[in-house]
Image (cartoon, rainbow, N blue to C red):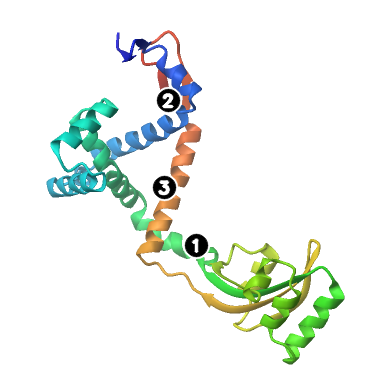
Amino acid sequence: MAHLKIGNHTITSAEIPHLLAGFQMLPQLCRLLVIERAITSLSSANADFELTPSEKIGVIEQFYQNNQLTTPEAIAKVLKHYSMSLEQLEGVATRELKIEKFKIATWGTKLESYFLQCKPQLDKVIYSLIRISDAEVAQELYFRIKAGEQTFAECASVYSQGAEAQTQGMLGPVPISQPHPAIAQKLTISQSGQLWPPMKLDEWFVIVRLEKLIPAQLDDAMRSTLLNHLFETWLAEEISKAQLTIHDDAPASVLITR
């Protein structure tokens, strides 16, 4: 029966699941196993998914460089520290690239439609905000700004009672979904420079003006963000469906079933 030995202490295979549970490591193990199973399944079904020899060599060399594993001695030290084989270390080195290829193979063709679906929440805004607890003061400031008697920045610096006073009321760029929903709704239908009368939000009266709308674009950074979001959403669902149990009557007894 397999076992671990740390100094003079022997840990049997029956103890390992309970130790993983006690050290709160089972969720991470479950995550890694779900990913590994998905990658292995895709690799078996699609030969094009396999790393090419040049991809494998390149990513391993990059991994070694990033982790200062530039000599045989350094590699041997890591292998000893983690009690792993060279093949296992290369598996670690190539895992992230395999995950990226899995994301692209699974959701790459769906990104454009998903982007269009999410775009209203991905657009960013720069806007100005004043919040005051006194309705009459808020109304007065609104009329001053509207009439050009004072600038928004001047009023925000002097009167606004939130952190935005330190930036002359200016906030952003932030995703349009980030502000309070009532503010986001105003910004969504605003033209640049549009000033809104005070509205009550909780204990505050707020004055809002849209400065600039920054439409989201499906560039490389956005593609990566969307792929990561789809992957993490899928992974959370898969983990929630996985049934993780510990059976004391079987060796290597952590089971993840569907």
Q: Is residue 161 left or right of residue 233?
A: right
In the depicted view, which residue is nearer to us: 147 or 221?
Answer: 147
Packing grade of label 1 (10 A; few <14, some 14-19, many >=20) is few
| Residue 225 higher or lower than 173, as above or below | above
SS type, badge 1:
helix
Q: Give me the C-alpha separation between circle 1 and circle 2.
A: 33 Å
The residue located at (46%, 69%) in the rendering is 216
Q: Secondary structure at mark 3?
A: helix
Residue 132: name its quadrant: bottom right
Q: Circle 2 is placed at which residue position?
A: 257
- Mark 2 and mark 3 lie on one chain; the one further toward the N terminus is 3
Q: CA distance from mark 1 to mark 3?
A: 17 Å
Reply above or below: 142 against 7. Answer: below
Spot the residue most to the right.
Answer: 136
Which quadrant, please, contains the N terminus? top left
Q: Is residue 110 left or right of residue 124?
A: left
The picture places residue 5, in percent across and down from the top left corner, at 32, 14
At horizontal 70% and vertical 82% (from top left) the residue drawn is 154
SS for dot 2: strand
Q: Which residue is mark 1?
A: 117
Quadrant of the image occupied by residue 135 = bottom right
Q: Could you say where residue 57 lies in the image, as x and y percent from the top left? A: 15, 46
Q: Amino acid at mark 3?
A: Phe
Q: Could you give the CA–CA distance between mark 2 and mark 3, rounded to whole angstroms?
A: 20 Å
Q: Nearer the viewer, residue 198 or 182?
A: 198
Which quadrant holds residue 82? top left
Q: How many marks?
A: 3
Q: 214 or 68, which lies in front?
A: 68
Dot 1 or dot 3: first in sequence order is 1
Residue named by callout 3: 231
